[in-house]
Image (cartoon, rainbow, N blue to C red):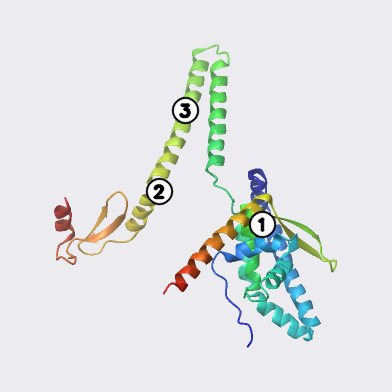
């Protein structure tokens, strides 16, 4: 499947989740109907045939949910798509800035307005870029800190972070060698 | 003595689906039937588990699907192998042969 086709399918599944669910359900029901018919042909009563078909199929709702979930996920890494969106936004911001500079100004107030518009646009662009790169760089570490901070430290516990992992440490505890976390830190240094 | 059905190893279902579709387009039920047929009814598959597998393979671009009318005049979703899927099947077969050969060698070692 090409990336364009995959994106169209992804958007379709996102925009029309009910239709996707209906299609998945119809497909799974077709399977059970076919199995029921085969069971009837092999000599079962219709009720027995349907029960046996449902049993051999397994958990209908679980498989339906799984199929819907898979349809709602993109099949490729969305980062290039996001980068493209950022470039488009940056180009738009640049175009607006150029337009603001090129609009004829007849007064100092007009010129000032244009400068303010350019400053705000530049600030917004830089702010968004920095926020996103910070978010990416921090990654799991930020999540760890967030989780650790939510938990209330107990007696003798301190919040520590070594840049990769954040946790609460009991400074009165001893490890296998009988060292406290502080003694261990000095020893390792 | 009756034949005992073997459970599937993780990842082999994908290969079996690709193999079943290499012989022509089929709906989900037909794929299950064909797997049973080509394995001489020796492999045990929970029939519903075929579908998440089919959706995953379609998402990877190895198979494609479209709604059509089945032999009994019912609307059904038919799957077919794509060119990428055909290449993938060759790779999977080669990997499987290598793995099976190595396992057999290990088991026969005294």
Which numbered disc, 3 or 2, marks the residue closer to the eye? 2
Image-based side of B106 in relation to B31, left or right: left
Write down the quadrant of residue A44 in the picture. Answer: bottom right
Q: Residues within 10 Å of mark 3 (few under 14, many from 20)?
A: some
Question: Label 3 lies in what chain?
Answer: A
Please identify the quadrant where the N terminus of chain B is shown: bottom right
Write down the quadrant of residue A183 in the picture. Answer: bottom left
| Residue B27 pos. (x, y %) | 74, 64
Look at the image and tell me whether residue B62 can be seen.
Answer: no
Residue behind mark 2 = A139
Please identify the quadrant where the C terminus of chain B is shown: bottom left
| Residue A97 pos. (x, y %) | 53, 23
3D distance between C-alphas at marks 1 and 3: 38 Å
> Tags 3 and 2 in contact by the CB under 8 Å rule?
no
Write down the quadrant of residue A3 in the picture. Answer: top right
In this rendered view, identify the residue nearer to me: A133 or B83: B83
3D distance between C-alphas at marks 3 and 2: 26 Å
Name the N-terminal-most of marks 1 and 2.
Answer: 1
Question: Label 1 lies in what chain?
Answer: A
Residue placed at 56% from the left, 62% from the top?
Answer: B97
> Tags 1 and 2 in contact by the CB under 8 Å rule?
no
Question: Label 2 lies in what chain?
Answer: A
Which numbered disc, 1 or 2, marks the residue closer to the eye? 2
Relative vertical location of residue A128 with respect to residue A7 in this rendering, above or below: above
Residue behind mark 1 = A17
Residue behind mark 3 = A122
Element at label 3: helix
């Amino acid at each position: 499947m090409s990336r364009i086709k995959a994106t169209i399918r992804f958007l379709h599944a996102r925009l029309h989740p009910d239709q996707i669910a209906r299609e998945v359900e119809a497909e799974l029901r077709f399977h059970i109907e076919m199995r029921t018919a085969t069971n009837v042909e092999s000599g079962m009563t219709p009720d027995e045939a349907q029960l046996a078909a449902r049993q051999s199929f397994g958990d209908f709702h679980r498989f339906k949910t799984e199929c819907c979930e898979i349809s709602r996920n993109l099949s490729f890494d969305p980062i290039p798509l996001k980068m493209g969106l950022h470039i488009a936004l940056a180009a738009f911001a640049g175009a607006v800035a150029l337009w603001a500079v090129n609009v004829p100004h007849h007064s100092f107030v007009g010129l000032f307005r244009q400068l303010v518009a350019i400053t705000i646009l530049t600030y917004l662009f830089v702010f968004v870029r920095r926020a996103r790169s910070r978010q990416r760089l921090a990654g799991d570490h930020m999540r760890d800190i967030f989780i650790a901070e939510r938990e209330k430290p107990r007696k003798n516990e301190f919040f520590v972070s070594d840049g990769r992992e954040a946790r609460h440490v009991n400074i009165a505890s001893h490890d296998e060698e009988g060292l406290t976390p502080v003694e261990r830190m000095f020893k390792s240094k | 003595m009756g034949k005992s059905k073997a459970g599937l190893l993780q990842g082999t279902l994908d290969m079996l689906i690709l193999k079943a579709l290499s012989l022509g387009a089929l709906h989900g039920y037909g794929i299950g039937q064909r797997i049973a047929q080509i394995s001489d009814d020796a492999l045990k598959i929970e029939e519903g588990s075929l579908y998440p597998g089919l959706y995953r393979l379609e998402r990877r671009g190895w198979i494609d699907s479209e709604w059509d009318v089945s032999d009994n005049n019912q609307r059904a979703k038919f799957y077919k192998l794509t060119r990428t899927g055909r290449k993938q099947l060759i790779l999977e077969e080669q990997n499987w042969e290598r793995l099976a050969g190595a396992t057999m060698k290990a088991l026969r070692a005294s």
